[in-house]
Image: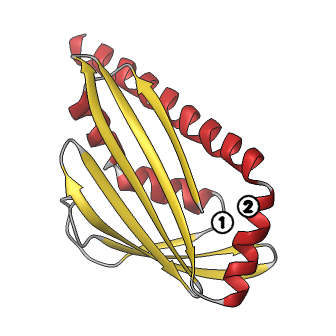
Amino acid sequence: MKFSTKEDIEAPIDVVFEMLCDFEVFERAAMRRGAEVQRLETSKEPGIGMTWHASFDLRGKRRELDLEIVEFDQPNDMALESTSPGMLSRTSFELMALSRNQTRVVVNLELKPLTLSARLLVQSLKLAKASLSKRFGKRVAEYARSMEERYVREAGSSSA
């Protein structure tokens, strides 16, 4: 099952990619929602092989998830694969400079069930694909707007 959306962000491509690589922001956001997130290596520089382990409650059950950066081509694209019992997913971010201060980000998410129960879950998600696609697009758009706001704030504070 695949989800895809794109957003245009009023910020240079290098800045957008750097914000996408600010993994501590994502880690804190997941923890605020009740997840436990642990970075599994000590490298401060983002790149291929960077990994995390997360656990969280979903639908009344504890879920475990391992994430790894599998593609990293700064500032053009990045892909993460996540594995959990029964499910494999891949999230990719493709960036394209539209102008000096505008960047298009294409976000793709693909879910691959590995077990029968995961297949049943994905099948039920397919029935709600239209609403899930809308929610996915809305979340990406909200994050894109927050990146623009952050860029304006930081650009304003550095010129002061």
Question: Callout 2: 10 Å neighbours few (<14), some, many (20+)?
Answer: some
Relative horizontal placement of residue 95, taking residue 3 as reference (left or right) = left
Residue type, label 1? Gly
Disc 2 from disc 1: Cα separation: 27 Å
The residue lying toward the viewer, choosing from 71 and 113, is: 113
Residue at 61% across, 57% down: 32
Q: Earlier in the sequence, mark 2 or mark 1?
A: 1
Residue at (47%, 51%) from the top-left corner? 108
> Which element type, helix, strand or loop, lies under badge 1?
loop
The location of residue 4, given as percent across then percent down, is 52, 46
Q: Determine the residue positioned at 63% across, 45% down.
A: 136
Q: Quadrant of the N terminus?
A: bottom right
**Is residue 11 shown above or below 96?**
above
Name the residue carrying label 1: 34
Q: Quadrant of residue 39?
A: bottom left
Q: Position of residue 27 (x, y in %)?
A: 47, 60
Please, which colouring scheme is shown? secondary structure
